[in-house]
Image (cartoon, rainbow, N blue to C red):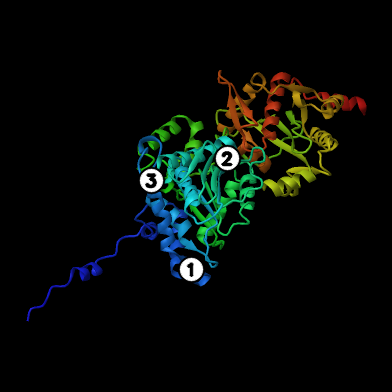
Amino acid sequence: MVVAAPARKSVRRMAAPPRRPSDGVHAYARAVDAGRIVAGPYVRAAARRHLADLDAGARRGLRFDAGLADHALRFFDYLRLAEGEFAGRPFTLAPAQVFVVGSLFGWVGPDGYRRFRLAYIEMGKGNGKSPLLSGVGLYCLLADEEQGAEVYAAAVTREQAGIMFRDAKRMAEASPSLRSRLEVSEHNIAHPASGSFFRPVSSEGRSLDGKRVHAGLIDEIHEHPSSVVVDKIRAGTKGRRQALICEITNSGYDRHSVCWQHHDYSIKVATGAIENDAWFGYVCALDEGDDWTDEAVWPKANPLLDVSITRKYLREQIAEAQGIPAKGDIVKRLSFCVWTEGAARWLPLEGWDAMADGRLIPPGTVAFAGLDLASTTDLTAFTLVAPREHCDQEGHAGRCIDLRAFFWAPEAGARRRAERDRVPYLQWAREGWITLTPGDITDYRAVRAGIHDIAERVVLRAIGYDRWNAAQIVTELGDDGFFMIPVGQGYASLATPSREIETFVIGGLIHHDGNPVLRWMVGNVNAETDPAGNLKPSREKSTDRIDGIAAWCDALFARHVAGEPRDEVSAYETVRTILT
């Protein structure tokens, strides 16, 4: 008997099924979890969360819909990139991008709608964050089955919001499949068939108010000074069945910012410390102990390494950082996802804590002070500088200083700042580092009394103060017998004190009392320079209050003007003797 060969149809049924785009989502998670793809601790945590939810998420009503993920992932095949060496090419998603897009659109919640409502994505500069979110925005505009969808590229300024919008606009214009369906103008991409649009908005003016947000794409959240943009975009989603907010960012420096809050929260969600099934986090970071100059760890911060960002570029950045110390924090933060203490921190905090000691300034020590009145509704700082008789640094006899800082603030203002900006003013007040005065404005009578108390313990040779921010208290202190020296806030007055501060901090020539308010300000302060290379602290470029640093500069200026003392009797002591 002759046995017929199997039909070709049967052979095709027995073959492996064609690979679906969504398979790449799970493959990425498994490869990261197994260590086949180099990733940082929080991306590994996100991968494990994904795999765990595939196994057990159904108990919470979660399911991964491969069809929905495929639909979103295939949409990117229709997009064409519009800039640089990739101009005109299809938008081919890298494995990390497949994981992000597939997760956002593939997971479904108990209500049958999209599971993830907020996504926080943090990775190194040059890893295609803005183009990726531009593609997400175009998908939400065209293919998310939402009539009247309102999609916004949102940022603090119009200029920043326009960057992501321009990426979306150029992709739309470069993609034949999209161009025929859309009406593109300078500030609007419209999809007439669904009555939907995509526009840039910012916190300038009132452009964030009254929106009915289907998709909010928030760019460079580390640059946001407050949560205004995030809060208003989120408030605009309340009437949408499956709104999506995506935040993209480099790592930041301000641990009181909305970016840090969402960075920290995303880590806690990914690691299981907090359960929030509606929150997606993809947070790139190095592992503790990693050397950021080691090429082996670079993919942890740069998931598109060798795709959109080159090793040559990163090598150049490292070389510049090693040759220009001031650039080190910027490179670590932007390219290697290391949260630093400042945007381009002027004073290194490394070693600051080691300069704290418990020794008191000997009674009768001659000292110089600086007074920064700042604002009647915020901190007033009084900084004391005294030469150190015995210097712990070998070879620096006579160069060390004792540094002390005193702060006053209105109680109501401190409470507002503590709640709004998460600055622990009230804790510092309880610990005695800030003196609170009743009401909404600083009671300068308390400041004046505090300065008199300080003058009972040391000999105040002179007090420098900002001549452009003088108040009645300056006149009163002068009448009390203190030698008050006005200090201009330009380079002519502040360049020399600023260079001295650098020398004191970098050389370890300071002895301080561990004041956490002053430490916070050292971490906040950034400097600016003029064309001649002169230096001064910059309130505009600093990340938060720097009143203590400003007062420190004023104290050093006063020391230069008044000169070293010839005796141990201050003007204050002379007046007090006459009065008594």
The nearer-to-camera label among 3 and 2 is 3
Using residue 413 as the reference point, say whether residue 202 is left or right of it: left
The amino acid marked with disc number 2 is: Glu
Image location (x, y in percent) of residue 227: 63, 46
- Marks 1 and 3, the one that precedes in the sequence: 1
Label 2: how many residues lie within 10 Å, few (<14), some (14-19) or many (20+)? many
The dot on residue 57 is 1
Q: CA distance from mark 3 to mark 2?
A: 27 Å
The amino acid marked with disc number 3 is: Phe
- Marks 3 and 2, the one that precedes in the sequence: 3
Quarter of the figure that contains the C terminus: top right
Label 3: how many residues lie within 10 Å, few (<14), some (14-19) or many (20+)? many
Circle 2 sits on which residue? Answer: 223
Q: Nearer the viewer, residue 518 or 94?
A: 94
Quarter of the figure that contains the N terminus: bottom left
Image location (x, y in percent) of residue 384: 72, 32
Q: Secondary structure at mark 2?
A: helix
Q: CA distance from mark 1 to mark 3?
A: 31 Å
Circle 3 sits on which residue? Answer: 91
Q: Secondary structure at mark 3?
A: loop
The amino acid marked with disc number 1 is: Gly
Q: Is residue 195 above or below residue 6?
A: above
Q: Nearer the viewer, residue 225 or 513?
A: 225
Using residue 291 as the reference point, say whether residue 516 is left or right of it: right
Q: Secondary structure at mark 1?
A: helix
Image location (x, y in percent) of residue 501: 61, 29
Tag 1 and tag 3, C-beta contact below 8 Å? no
- Which residue corresponds to the image point at 43% horizontal and 43% vertical from the top-left? 179
